[in-house]
């Protein structure tokens, strides 16, 4: 019967090669899965950074409108999405909260009255693709408040 695989030196080289390739494949797949996780983390971080930028933009507009005095107004246009995801902006007297994919970006605002023209409410929601007008109005001749209304 011919030579067995154990006595054949070229067969042992092939087995060594197969084992080396198996280890190389395992290491490569591990590196790819780690890199994929890092890319997802970087994308989420970039999305949250954009959420924070939007919250800062809205909080700054509220501050400028309030400090501008009676009748001062600013127009804000909301972006259509944050890295392809929908988001919601919630504004109240203490700050601006942007919610995207279960995560939040927040910007503090000094205490002031916030409402919308539709209701005399203490929270206003802002949505993507819409334009909003922020106005400083006098309320009961005692104090000012920032009124946020959707521009039609």
Image (cartoon, helix red, strand yellow):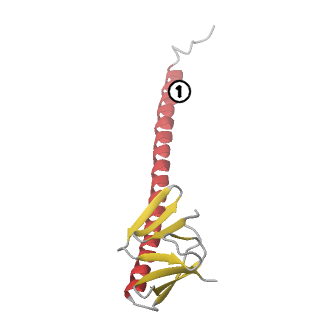
Which residue shows up at 47% across the image and 32% down it? Answer: 23
- Closer to us: 146 or 51: 146
Q: Quadrant of the N terminus?
A: top right
Give coordinates of residue 67: x percent, y percent.
37, 86
Which residue shows up at 49% across the image and 35% down it? Answer: 26
Q: Quadrant of the C terminus?
A: bottom right
Give coordinates of residue 74: x percent, y percent.
48, 86
- Closer to us: 140 or 106: 140
- Closer to us: 36 or 80: 80
Q: Secondary structure at mark 1?
A: helix
Mark 1 Cα within 10 Å, few/some/many (few <14, many 20+)? few
Which residue shows up at 36% across the image and 73% down it? Answer: 111
Seen in the picture, residue 31 relative to 98 is either above or below; the reply is: above
Give coordinates of residue 55: x percent, y percent.
44, 71
Seen in the picture, residue 49 relative to 71 is either above or below; the reply is: above
Q: Residue pushed farthest left? A: 110
Residue 61 falls in which quadrant of the image?
Answer: bottom left
Give coordinates of residue 98: x percent, y percent.
48, 65
How many numbered badges does the structure rendering display?
1
- Residue linked to disc 1: 14
Which residue shows up at 46% across the image and 43% down it? Answer: 31
- Closer to us: 138 or 3: 138
Q: Residue pushed farthest bottom? A: 71
């Amino acid at each position: 019967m011919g030579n067995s695989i154990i006595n054949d030196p070229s067969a042992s080289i092939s087995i060594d090669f197969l084992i080396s390739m198996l280890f190389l494949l395992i290491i490569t797949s591990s590196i790819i899965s780690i890199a994929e996780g890092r890319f997802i983390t970087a994308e989420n971080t970039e999305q949250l950074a954009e959420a924070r930028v939007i919250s800062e933009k809205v909080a700054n507009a509220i501050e400028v409108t309030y400090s501008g005095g009676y009748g001062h107004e600013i127009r804000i246009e909301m972006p259509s999405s944050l890295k392809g995801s929908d988001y919601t902006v919630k504004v109240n007297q203490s700050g601006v909260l942007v919610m995207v994919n279960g995560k939040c970006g927040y910007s503090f605002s000094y205490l002031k009255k916030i409402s919308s023209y539709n209701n005399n409410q203490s929270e206003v929601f802002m949505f993507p693709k819409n334009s909003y007008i922020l106005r400083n109005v006098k309320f009961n001749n005692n104090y000012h408040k920032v009124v946020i209304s959707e521009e039609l």
